[in-house]
Image: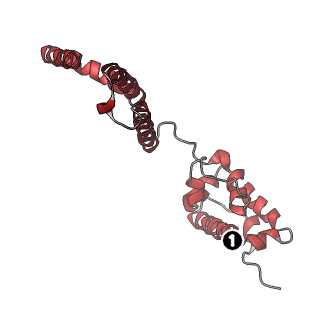
Amino acid sequence: MAPDPFDTQRLYKTYAVNSPNAAMEFQEMVEDFMEIVRNEEEWIATGNNIIHVDAFIVLVRGKEMWPLAKLVIPEFQETQAFDTETNTAVNYVLRAVFDKRPAIPIYDPKLLEEEKFVRRHLCHTVEYLATLGMGEDGLSKEEKQALGVLSKLIEKVIDPDKEVDDQQRQRTAGPSGGAQAGDDDEEEQQEA
């Protein structure tokens, strides 16, 4: 019989986390056990070893233990959006500590930039479809005006804050802001 890859007695030891040495020993145990969980699916599936995984979960979920455990396990630092759907031992552990892991940020700048990119791509697709892929050259005057209105609506969808920012700039610009607005009117008259 092959030796166990992990001494399970380490799971049932009492760790005094107020002692630096005991805290380090606990963190080493957590790292070692998670390494087994990641790489030794067969060991976990044999015998009653799933009981040890459950004991590990109870141990790391402890109020004093979780802060130490999450420092050494990268998966514990992942947001709740981290995929845990497949039935692996790691995902079993991650699902058990789901509420302990960081929540999904509501305003993640990376996600906002990606969302703007996707919106812009969709808007370009709509414009392409509206012109049947021929661009503005093949459109009548009415179709160009409709496309202009569509483009303005699309721009509001892409960046709804832009209109508010433009209005604030015009208010703070004073007389020069009025001149810019007149320029827009001249452009519209030229198109007509």
The residue depicted at 30 percent of the width and 24 percent of the height is 165
Nearer-the-camera pick, 131 or 1: 131
What crowding class fits label 1: few (fewer than 14 Cα within 10 Å), some (14-19), or many (20 or more)?
some
The residue depicted at 57 percent of the width and 46 percent of the height is 102
Residue 68 appears anywhere in the view = no
Nearer-the-camera pick, 55 or 38: 38
Q: In the image, is 183 to the left or to the right of 91?
A: left
Q: In the image, is 135 to the left or to the right of 68?
A: left
Residue 70: x %, y % from top left: 58, 56
Dot 1 falls on a residue whose secondary structure is: helix
Q: In the image, is 41 to the left or to the right of 122?
A: right
Above/below status of 110 relative to 19: above
Nearer-the-camera pick, 34 or 123: 123
Name the quarter where the N terminus is drawn. bottom right
Q: Of the residues shown, which amino acid type is indicated by label 1?
A: Ile
Residue 74: x %, y % from top left: 56, 59
The residue depicted at 69 percent of the width and 71 percent of the height is 36
Direction bottom: furthest residue: 1
Residue position for label 1: 36
